[in-house]
Image (tube, grey):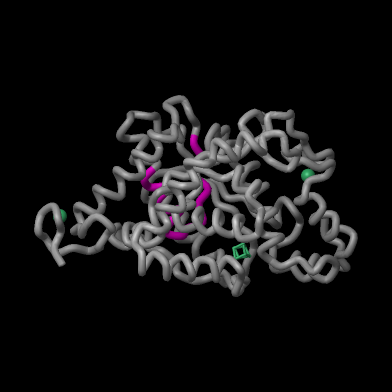
Amino acid sequence: MNCNKCQDKAVIKLQHGSLCKKHFIDYFESKVFQTINKFELIRRDDKVCVAASGGKDSLSALYLTKKYFLKYNIPLQNLNALIINEGIYGYREKTLQDLQDFCKDQDINLKILSFKEFYGKDLDQAYPIINKITGKKPCNICGVWRRQLINIGARELGATKLVTGHNLDDESQVVLMNMFKANVKISAKLGPMSGISNHENFVRRVKPLYLCSEKETRLYALLKKWKVEFTECPYVTESYRAEVREMLNNMEEKYPGTKTGIINSFLDTLPLLKEKFKDDKNNHQTTNKPNVCEICSEPTNKKVCNACELKKIIINNDTTKTK
Ligand code: SF4
Ligand SMILES: [Zn+2]
Ligand SMILES: [Zn+2]
């Protein structure tokens, strides 16, 4: 299999032909830059924070955001990285170290926030306490706290945009899951730029890898020879999402372009979805004035946000009585 552009040995077969290492890297990088420009994800006056995890997606997002800054002469002091240490023994330490090395090498300032510091407990400690009372799974707790801390961290860094490493696979899985579960109004919150647009406490989230598949992103990280930790979080379990992922991968294998087809159709309907659900009180895209939590002042649609609710459960049920 040879590259369609130069006849060198191809490293990947894409829907419209095969590419060698050099031409794949060019293709991948220009796709990311075109995504940023087309959806206006980053503007010259933006201060950008990249939410990183040390995995291939976030390293690609971080590296390419820096490359975008350099290409368009945006001052590099307006770029920072952020990682949340959930406190998952045997998992986070390794990815944290890899990310610290990466940021040092790339000369990017890295901010680290932890569950322990904000909520009084690591996830490993919080999970058994919360699970006993509510039956919640680790990922439910992790998701709520991570989302809040990423917003807090980005705001503390003065960011006007928060870059995440979500890719085509992530988004197409969520779009399908929402459709299968008749939760289409949740999809109104998705898209290359998401989050509340008119809330001073909320930093808008942008996804430069939106049109890049998992396979392409994995190959890009591999060709860049980045040290990427393939250790999985020990709390990862078989889930509904894993089944949708497998189904989509099978479809993509049989009918290349399936995932892109889902996302292109979704992008066509997204303006209609946003319009339809714009007044929904649970929709963060709402144009109504969003509320803030009466305890922590973070954006929420309730009186007390989910993150504070979880923290309260710990305070009321922790036999060791820390924080
Ligand atoms: S798998 Fe679940 S617990 Fe582990 S990092 Fe992801 S969301 Fe958190
Ligand atoms: Zn080539
Ligand atoms: Zn709160």
Q: Relative to the observer, which residue lies in front, 30 or 109?
A: 30
Where's the C terminus, which quadrant?
A: bottom right
Q: Seen in the image, is 60 located left or right of residue 112?
A: left
| The magenta stretch spans residue 164 | no
Q: Seen in the image, is 245 located left or right of residue 105?
A: right
Where's the N terminus, which quadrant?
A: bottom left
Task: Place residue 240 in its image quadrant.
Answer: bottom right
The x, y position of residue 84, in whole percent, is: 59, 53
Q: Seen in the image, is 317 located left or right of residue 156?
A: right
| The magenta stretch spans residue 62 | yes
Point out the residue furthest to the top here: 45
Point out the residue furthest to the left here: 7
Q: Relative to the observer, which residue lies in front, 224 or 28?
A: 28
Name which residue lies at 60% across and 43% down: 188
Q: Relative to the observer, which residue lies in front, 185 or 14?
A: 185
In the image, residue 29 sits, relative to residue 92, either above or below, namely above
- Quadrant of the picture in which ligand 2 is shown: bottom left
Q: Relative to the observer, which residue lies in front, 308 or 193?
A: 193
The reply to whether residue 104 is in sight is no
**Magenta part of the protein: which range?**
48-64
